[in-house]
Image (spheres, rainbow, N blue to C red):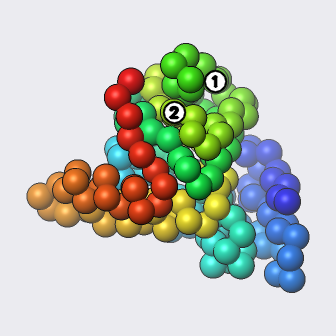
Amino acid sequence: MAACRRPSQSAIFVRVISELSPIVIPCGVGDVMHAFGEQVIVHLSGAQTGGKIALWTEITPPDAGPPPHYHLNEDEFFFVQEGKMAFLQDGQWEQVERGGWPSCHARAFTLSRMSAMRRAKCSLQRFEIFFARCAEEFAKSEGPDMERIVAISAEHGIHYVTP
């Protein structure tokens, strides 16, 4: 269970129910990764929570983000901090504005579109590991090997679909 201060405050406070001590993360602090046209700042890693969760901010330019996909192993939870976001879920677009808390459950197709946005995301540690592996592919000077991206995704229970 985690509780976070409002995004306008100077830090994110997270208390994970476990043997771990509370952690205070100053805003803007974290490891930065790039993949799928997004910048991800990992504020709280799975290593810091005993593998329970990871918490990060995704910054997505207009009309960027991953292609439609679904997750077999985890749900995704978002908090839209800036801009607007639209999710393709069950064949329908759902628009979420700043301050919204959309959630996309396992086997739901998701896709971000609209204006530039910033969103906080909470998921299991496995997703943090997936994104780091994809970021390595996207960092290659020749660009990512998309067959490799699809293979990495499948290893993590993430599958892409045609809308």
Residue 70, above or below 48: above
Q: Tell me if mark 1 has few (under 14), some (14-19) or many (20+) residues whose alpha carbon lies within 10 angstroms of its own.
A: some
Q: Nearer the viewer, residue 80 or 19?
A: 19
Residue, far left? 142
Q: Report the residue at 45% width, 26% height from top.
A: 113
Tell me which corner region of the image, top left, top right, bottom left or bottom right, holds residue 50.
bottom right
Q: Quadrant of the N terminus?
A: bottom right
Residue 68, above or below 8: above
Residue 5, above or below 140: above
The answer to whether the residue labelled 1 contacts the one labelled 2, judged by CB atoms less than 8 Å apart, is no
Left or right, 108 with reference to 156:
right
Given the image, on which type of amino acid does mark 1 rest?
Val
Residue 56 pos. (x, y %): 60, 56
> Which mark identifies residue 96?
1
- Residue where numbered disc 2 is placed: 109
Given the image, on which type of amino acid does mark 2 rest?
Phe
Left or right, 115 with reference to 75:
left
Q: Tell me if mark 2 has few (under 14), some (14-19) or many (20+) residues whose alpha carbon lies within 10 angstroms of its own.
A: many
> Which mark identifies residue 32?
none
Q: Is residue 81 visible?
A: no
Q: Could you say whether the residue bearing mark 1 is in a helix, strand or loop?
A: strand
Q: Report the residue at 57% width, 35% height from top.
A: 108
Residue 87 pos. (x, y %): 55, 27
Q: CA distance from mark 1 to mark 2?
A: 15 Å
Residue 57 pos. (x, y %): 58, 51
Q: Could you say whether the residue bearing mark 2 is in a helix, strand or loop?
A: loop
Q: Report the residue at 63% width, 72% height from top.
A: 46
